[in-house]
Image (cartoon, rainbow, N blue to C red):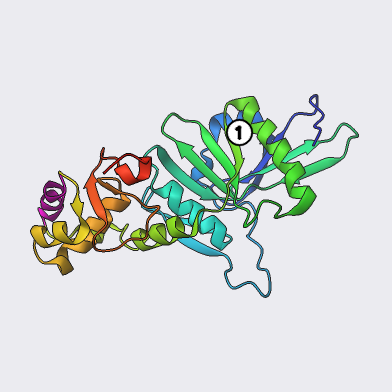
């Protein structure tokens, strides 16, 4: 979508007391902590859909993030595990711009993520490549330009592979700190997987598997341990230390 460069982009968001604010986009991007703001507008409820708006508890921030769809929730899981992500928010800003013909256009990206270097990602989470139709694709071009102008990134995030999504959902159930377990258990778990070994073997070596497995899954969620999440989780799946690379994932000989 063509944008009238002389008109620039504007940002609309809610301030900490819930008042709507409109500000030049470049200024807002420099000064506003979008990751701390509520949605500028509610996620729509679409009759007939099995999954509607909900809240995702973020292990990164310790706060809830508004999620508008199943596809968005899966992408939130992925970003919540990213060690470079420091903040997450759902629909915190609306972008406004004018076309070369003077028409006002607007778009509210579904997802905001802040990175450790201060830059950010605005994203939409379509359930399939053509979701949203021509309006969404045109808006994506404009929002990508707005982000590029300030050194940020915009993406329409592709749906994840079913196996990876299922594994993330399983591990996400153990993301809360309560799954660390008793004092010293995490250290024991990490020691038992200092060299790659099947999941169940490490769990048995760490003590009672019923006690150890939640701590192992918690460590896998937070990247203290690693495994190949492109393979369905099972008891013989190889688990290794943080910097281990599963040969089956790289195609190298085992």
Instruction: Determine whether 70 is above or below 91 in the image.
Output: below
Tell me what residue is drawn at x 43 percent, y 62 percent: 166
Please indicate whether residue 61 sits to the left or right of residue 69 in the image: left
x, y (%) of residue 24? Answer: 68, 31
Residue lying at the far right in this picture: please name it.
101
Residue 21: image x %, image y %?
Answer: 66, 42
* Residue 246 to residue 63: above or below: above
The one of 6 and 46 positioned closer to us in this rendering: 46
Residue hosting label 1: 28
Q: Position of residue 157 (x, y in %)?
A: 58, 47
User: Left of 6 or right of it: where is 93?
Assistant: left
- Where, quadrant-wise, is the N terminus in this rendering? top right
Q: Nearer the viewer, residue 243 or 185?
A: 243
- Residue segment shown in magenta: 183-194
Left or right of 80, for residue 7: right
Please indicate, yes or no, whether residue 24 appears anywhere in the rendered image: no
Question: Residue 215 magenta-drawn?
Answer: no
Q: What secondary structure is marked by label 1?
A: helix
């Amino acid at each position: 979508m063509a944008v009238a460069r002389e008109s620039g982009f504007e940002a609309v968001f809610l301030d900490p007391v819930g008042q709507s604010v409109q500000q030049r986009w470049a200024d807002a991007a420099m000064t506003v902590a979008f990751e701390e703001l509520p949605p500028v507008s509610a996620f729509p409820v679409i009759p007939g859909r099995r999954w509607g708006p909900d809240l995702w508890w973020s292990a990164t921030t310790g706060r809830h993030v508004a999620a508008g769809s199943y596809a968005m929730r899966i992408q939130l899981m992925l970003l919540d595990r990213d060690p470079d992500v420091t903040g997450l928010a759902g629909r915190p800003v609306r972008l406004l711009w004018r076309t070369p013909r003077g028409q006002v256009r607007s778009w509210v990206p579904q997802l905001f993520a802040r990175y450790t270097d201060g830059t950010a990602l605005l994203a939409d989470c379509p359930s399939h490549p053509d979701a949203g139709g021509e309006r969404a694709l045109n808006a994506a071009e404009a929002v990508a330009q707005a982000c590029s102008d300030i050194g940020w990134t915009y993406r329409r995030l592709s749906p994840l592979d079913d196996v990876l999504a299922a594994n993330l959902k399983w591990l996400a159930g153990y993301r809360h700190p309560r799954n660390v377990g008793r004092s010293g258990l995490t250290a024991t778990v990490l020691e038992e997987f200092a060299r790659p070994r099947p999941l169940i073997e490490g769990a048995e070596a760490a003590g009672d598997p019923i006690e150890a497995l939640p701590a192992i899954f918690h460590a896998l969620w937070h990247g203290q341990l690693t495994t190949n999440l492109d393979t369905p989780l099972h008891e013989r799946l190889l688990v290794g230390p943080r910097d281990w690379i599963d040969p089956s994932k790289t195609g190298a000989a085992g």
